[in-house]
Image (cartoon, rainbow, N blue to C red):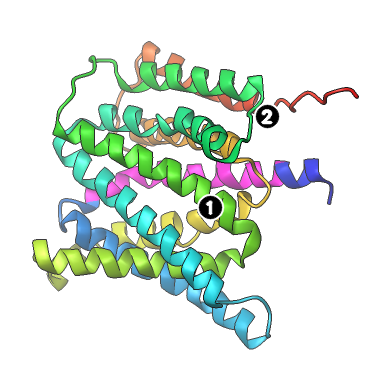
Amino acid sequence: MTAKTSSLKGNMMIIVATLIWGAGYVAQSSGMYHVSPLTFNGVRFAIGGTIALLPTLFFMRRKQAGINKGTVVAGVLCGLVLCLAINLQQFGIIHTSVANASFITTLYVIMVPVASFAFFRKRPSAYVWVSAGVAIVGMYFLSLSDGFYVNIGDILIFLCAICFTVQILIISHFSPKHNVIALACVQFYVVSVVSFSLAFLFETPSLDGISAAAPYVLYTGVLSSGVAYILQMKAQKTTDATIAAVLFSFEAVIAALVGWLILSQFLSPREIFGCMLIFAAILIAQIPKPKHKN
């Protein structure tokens, strides 16, 4: 498989992951009517970890690359960052509008190339910078139709965007070096254990609440966690972190479309224009980096 074909395959995996995450917005928000955020994430990632555990045990039984000391260390680091990001986002949404949250979270589209250059000296192409800028403008038109107002929820979401920036970068660093399913398995269980531990300290988890939220937890646990995050890890073996960040912005478009189809949330011409800009940004990000002549 050529590098170009491998990169295209990775990009398609990220698009599939964003489809799952975007469609899962309804499940994630609906689940909050029955359980608190930490409890929801604890159950969700326990399901995701269990799904990833089965093939991991298969690889280990076949004496193929499975869980080893290096994978555990990498998975713990990835899990702690993801746990912080996902819970900051969940608590932030409680205190701010979904529009503000989606816009601020997507700031990682700019943060990732900046951080990638600052810490790893990876200089993105001009096309990537243009696509990141177009994606941010698109998110503005899609999310902030009523203006932008800063509150404590927005600050939490901004911290979440920083965490997702780190998560995208460390996944790009670790995924080529480890079995991604084993890495995901450790990451998911770390998120689940930490979330549950905090839930029993600050919330009141109940079987009745979890049972009522079962359809939403199952969707986010099986698909949003067990499938989408594994696709992200596998994709970032070949997809540059800066391009991956731009592709992830497509999640907001899917969330808006699902809200329109399922929740009958009307899309204004301004929001449709924002969706078109984000789609344009994704196309721009696919333009190959010019080769320098000797």
Which mark is drawn over residue 171? 1
The number of numbered discs placed on residues in the rendered structure image is: 2
| Residue under the image location 37 percent in, 18 percent down | 140
Amino acid on which disc 1 is placed: Ile
Q: Which comes sooner in the sequence, label 1 or label 2?
A: 1
Q: Is residue 225 magenta?
A: no
Read off the residue under disc 2.
286
Is 154 situated above or below 90? above
Residue at left 38%, top 62%? Answer: 221
Q: Is residue 155 left or right of residue 56?
A: left
**Residue 177: horizontal and vertical position, in percent?**
64, 62
Q: Residue at x 12, y 70 (%)?
A: 206
Q: Nearer the viewer, residue 255 or 59?
A: 59
Secondary structure found at label 1: helix
Q: Which residues are magenta?
A: 8-30
Identify the image quadrant of residue 40. Answer: bottom left
Give the image location of residue 82, x and y in percent: 38, 54
Q: In the image, is residue 123 above or below residue 173?
A: above
CA–CA distance in space, label 1 to label 2 = 20 Å
Relative to 126, 96 lies left or right: left
* Residue type indicated by callout 2: Gln
Please determine whether, in this image, residue 106 is positioned above or below residue 174: above
Left or right of 217? Residue 213 is left
Dot 1 and dot 2 residues touching (CB under 8 Å): no
| Main secondary structure of the magenta stretch | helix
Rendered position, 65 above or below 217: below
